[in-house]
């Protein structure tokens, strides 16, 4: 099965009302590849504005969600509230939340299960640190993260898109080589084949994230197991359009 090319824009904790308006206007007027699925993830405060003003077939994602129903959880946002706001995706397991906010593999898996059971789709992130890569542990680290997710969600991966984001490549301008990225993507697909099933291996999109730019996206997109990108810094710039259109 041909997997639909997917480009996510993770705006992280960036933007103001005026800069976000500019990004939205730019996306609304752009000529986007009709064969690409595009999702942007603004900061929580701007989700409503972006959902209401963005068109061009683009979906909106939260950058986090809590794994409990509505209730007394100060500072959190629920699956129900996101769906009520027409926000259909959530990014979970981003390395910034794992390392800065201390989210464990189990917490990420629990949030992912709660989100997908509630009807959201999830961009689920994994990836190794520089130290782990240099110690030759990349596949072991990613496999451990995948194992923890599978322990919670079982064999239904239909609402999951995997984003492989080597931590050393995030926001550093140091992109993984096409070979480095393809090698890990192939290992993830093999893991899906062996630990889940042929359907999950065939259908699950695996994105690359980490210093993706308009300059390196074309080459990366040609790799057999790279089905799109999760873009940080460049998703705030007009260059994001070129990344969306990278397979054209
Ligand atoms: O989630 C996207 C990300 O972490 C990559 O960020 O700025 O290196 O594209 P950046």
Image (tube, grey):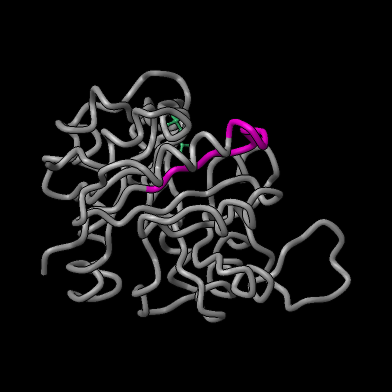
Dividing the picture into quadrants, the one containing residue 114 is bottom right
Say which residue appears at 73% left-offset and 78% top-offset.
69
Say which residue appears at 44% left-offset and 43% top-offset.
9
Q: Along the line of sight, which residue is nearer the eye, 145 or 169? A: 169
Q: Is residue 52 left or right of residue 129?
A: right
| Position in image of residue 247 (x %, y %) | 14, 42
| Position in image of residue 71 (x %, y %) | 84, 75
Q: Does 229 sit above or below residue 205?
A: above
- How many marks can you see? 0
| Position in image of residue 17 (x %, y %) | 67, 37
Q: Is residue 22 left or right of residue 68?
A: left
Dividing the picture into quadrants, the one containing residue 220 is top left
Looking at the rendering, in which quadrant would you find the C terminus? Answer: top left
Say which residue appears at 43% left-offset and 70% top-offset.
150
Q: Along the line of sight, which residue is nearer the eye, 185 or 62? A: 62
| Residue 12 lies in the magenta stretch | yes
Q: Along the line of sight, which residue is nearer the eye, 59 or 155? A: 59
Say which residue appears at 17% left-offset and 50% top-offset.
225
Q: What is the magenta range?
A: 8-19
Q: Is residue 105 left or right of residue 135?
A: right
Residue 128 shows in the view: yes
Looking at the rendering, in which quadrant would you find the N terminus? Answer: bottom left
| Position in image of residue 145 (x %, y %) | 46, 55
Quadrant where ligand 1 appears: top left
Q: Does 226 sit above or below residue 110?
A: above
| Residue 73 lies in the magenta stretch | no
């Amino acid at each position: 099965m041909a997997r639909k090319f997917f480009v996510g824009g993770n705006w992280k904790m960036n933007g103001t009302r005026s800069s976000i308006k500019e990004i939205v206007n730019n996306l609304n007027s752009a000529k986007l590849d009709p064969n690409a699925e595009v999702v942007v993830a603004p900061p929580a405060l701007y989700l409503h504005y972006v959902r209401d003003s963005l068109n061009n077939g683009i979906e909106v994602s939260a950058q986090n969600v809590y794994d409990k129903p509505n209730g007394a959880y100060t500072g959190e946002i629920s699956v129900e509230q996101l769906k009520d706001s027409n926000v259909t995706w959530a990014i979970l397991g981003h390395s910034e939340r794992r390392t800065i906010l201390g989210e464990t593999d189990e917490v990420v898996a629990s949030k992912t299960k709660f989100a997908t059971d509630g009807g959201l789709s999830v961009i689920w992130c994994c990836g190794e640190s520089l130290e782990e890569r240099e110690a030759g542990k990349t596949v072991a680290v990613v496999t451990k993260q995948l194992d923890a997710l599978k322990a919670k969600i079982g064999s239904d991966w239909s609402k999951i898109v995997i984003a492989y984001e080597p931590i050393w490549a995030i926001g550093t301008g140091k992109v993984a080589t096409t070979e480095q990225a393809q090698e890990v993507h192939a290992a993830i697909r093999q893991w899906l084949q062996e630990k889940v099933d042929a359907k999950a291996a065939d259908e699950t999109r695996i994105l690359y994230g980490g210093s993706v730019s308009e300059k390196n996206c074309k080459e990366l997109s040609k790799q057999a197991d790279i089905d799109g990108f999760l873009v940080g810094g460049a998703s705030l710039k007009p260059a994001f359009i070129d990344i969306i259109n990278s397979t054209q």
